Image: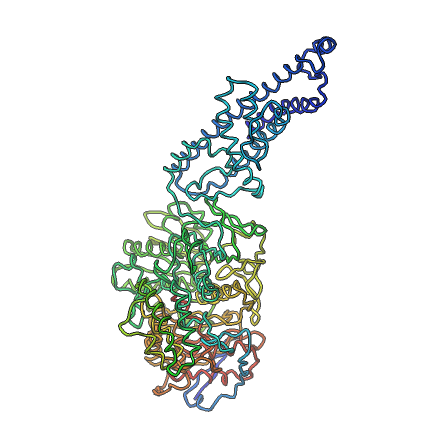
Amino acid sequence: MSYCRQEGKDRIIFVTKEDHETPSNAELIAEDPDDPYEEHGLILPNGDINWNCPCLGGMASGPCGSQFKEAFSCFHYSKEEVKGSECIENFRDMQECMQRYPELYPQEEDNESSSQAESSSPSVPANTTKGSGLPETDSTSTTSTPKSDVSIDSTSPTENETAS
Amino acid sequence: MLKCRSVWNKLAPLTKVSSNVCRHNGRRTGLTNFRIPPCAPAAHMSTGPRGGGRENQLYAALVGAVTITVGILSYRHLKEDARRYQDRIDEIESRTSKGIVKQESAPIQSEPPDVEAIETEVVPEPEPSAEPTAEPQLEPPAEPEPETPSAPSDAEATPPSDTTETPSAAAEAVVESAPEEVAEAPAAPAVEEGDLTKLPPSDLIEPSPAPIVDSGADTVPAPHKVPSHTPYLLIGGGTASFAAARSIRARDPGAKVLIVTEETDLPYMRPPLSKELWFSDDPSVTETLRFKQWNGKERSIYFQPASFYISPEDLDSAENGGVAVLTDKKVVHMDVRGNKVKLDDDTEISYGKCLIATGGVPRNLQVIDRAGEEVTSRTTLFRKIDDFRSLDKVSRNVKSITIIGGGFMGSELACALGRRTNESDLEVIQMFPEKGNMGKVLPEYLSNWTTEKVKKEGVKVVSEALVKSVTFKDDKLQIQLKDGRLVKTDHIVAAVGLEPNVDLAKSAGMEVDSDFGGYRVNAELQARSNIWVAGDAACFYDIRLGRRRVEHHDHAVVSGRLAGENMTGANKPYWHQSMFWSDLGPDVGYEAIGIVDSSLPTVGVFAKATSKDTPKAATEKSGTGIRSESETEDTATSPVASSSSSTPTVEQHKDDYGKGVIFYLRDKVVVGIILWNVFNRMPIARKIIKDGEEHADLNEVAKLFNIHED
């Protein structure tokens, strides 16, 4: 059973699990997907790629940033049946660049981009960056759903900046 | 300075003389020059031919005399400058610290008058010497300076020939640098050559003592070649700056970003310095600066390894741009009108857009500052990597450390050092004026509870302690408290706050906030056109919560990113609320957002914590190493969905604040939330603050957090 206590200006409530089982009647304001101030996920409302998404970490801003942008843009706008199939050249350029910076882009044995191409997940770039410098390495295990939905979870991807 | 003045004074009458000469020259009338004995002209004028040879001769003699004097004086002046220059180079070499700015500015002052002196005396010459000389001008667009040396070589064949060597060399130098001089703002001519950074700014004299210059340059170590212009200049090399650099590079393809930092290290994150690095088992951690995250993965505190950055020399020519870091350089002056800054070595860098992210400097207690070298040498102000290294060393060599300060830094360090008490016989004391740890942040009941936990970590807590004086006696630091207690210790760590660094406010003409400190900026983090401020140093307008200044890591990231976006044209206000977190040992950890001030009324909703509700478990679960990361990784593990495990509702001790949510209210609106041992729910907290609604029953709001679930 929950109880409540007041200590000066501070109020303390202890609640049991049962107390919190009934759904909350607290009202939250509906999210506006077109709010210009809001942080966006990987894909902006107009369909473009948000290069500044923390989920990309340093991919778009590092030494291989331009190659990465080329490759990923090509993939994103690809209308082919096998999405991204015409972008092999771009991805190869990107890989070549990344091989020059093994410290920043530790190499995995698999060709990351093509394996992820089918899933068309925004964590494609995240997948290529396992290693010390970049936190989204960890996100490979928690492959996320496309972030264009209006959900509280997706609008808060800032803290990746912490480590990269 | 005086020397120049005297020279000038000497030359002034000569100038008058020669200008008189000029005036009369055209008319070729009799000389009214006072130098010539008064009787002579009259006598000669009546008998000699018109414009008589005698007058001409005298006239030429006069001109010659003047030019010889000029030549001699210039020569002497040049020699002296060479000597002075050499003296300065020697002095620089023997110098241990920087800070020569004052000294250099004095010579700078003296140079221009010299220049003027030479120039003015030289200017009248051309007219008289125009006739005798058929010498081609040294440089067509140049001022008439070259005429001067060529004149004597015509008027007087041999004697001044050697003296004219140097003046002509000087003249060449004058010619070359004169257009430069003219183009420069009168303030301080730019010294662009990186390897001659210590030169007096007046380039005039440089080329002639060329051999001296070269040898001087050899002995002065050549620093980086610094780009003279950069489209994006970031002052400060910390978290906010790095976040901005990344943001700029992401949005402006091929952007060239130059970071100028006082520190010798590349950008790194500070939270592990008072937390994870202390928990490392690796004995070489002070060197590697790598820490093992809770999930087992290791990483370095540096945001990126050195290979990520390009060197400042290559910045201009980099095809795809890049981020360059100029370490060990301080920006000492900012010229907003001219869009340029000056470094402590007098290098000038002009910028397109500038970010000031200078952070701050740890505060110290006045009593310690005044206590003398024996006390200050045993006091640590903790902020940088070097402070971590030295404190680590100290902690292994002393018997007792006292931390003064009960806030985030003080409590974290106390807990970190407290852990060491198990391995060694180190005594860790923490003292502060409040009643309990985090007394200014947590409501009293929670602060007391936290203090008990800190004590369990092996820390001797001395609360309600106001330091009266600190002395060094009997080989121990004696801390005398105002209530009479005496604490004896070997080393002190002062964690009493941060003083935001606003050194550039004066020269840049920027406003400093009187309430919070720091540069005053608007909601878009802009201070003045082309200047933004982010991080600890920014006092900004938060649309939702009002004007504030935040000193947390995530805020540095968020504001740095926002500043970077706005520098590339976004014009977005501060809207995404940053969070912060703290761990006090393995059992107590919390995340917080918004204004969390213990003076506000609070409402706390608690459940009992299980073993699953610890900071360690939180990060392990989300598979990330640093708390604020876990927030973003969280996207898949929705807090509402994954409530598979049911925590058994064991009868809880009533005052056990295991886990819960605390709301901070201002005028009945929630302005701050603490998630107490409840993790991965920050998005909900952020939403509630963003809404800014008045909620009648906060228990209902607390339901949104599912505190009983994992």
Q: Relative to B351, is B417 on the left or the right?
A: left
Give the colour scheme shown.
Answer: rainbow
x, y percentage for residue A137? Answer: 34, 72
Residue name at image x 52 percent, y 76 percent: B689
Q: Position of residue B465 (x, y in %)?
A: 43, 60
- Is B45 displayed left or right of B270 in the figure? right
Viewer-closest of B179 and B369: B179
Q: Could you tell me residue A92's position as x and y percent? A: 34, 70
Q: In this view, does A73 lie above or below B36?
A: below
The picture quadrant where one finds residue B209 is top left
Q: Which of B679 and B111 is in front in this view?
A: B111
Report whether residue B499 is seen.
no
In which image quadrant can residue B658 be found?
A: bottom left
* Horizontal and vertical percent position of residue B170: 50, 30
Compared to residue B710, the image places residue B458 above or below, namely: above
Can you tell which quarter of the image residue B402 is in?
bottom left
Q: Residue at x 49, y 28 (%)?
A: B78
User: Foreground: B219 or B640?
Assistant: B219
Quarter that holds the C terminus of chain B: bottom left
Is residue B83 positioned above or below A37 on the image? above
Q: In which quarter of the image is the N terminus of chain B?
A: top right
Q: Nearer the viewer, residue B499 or B97?
A: B97
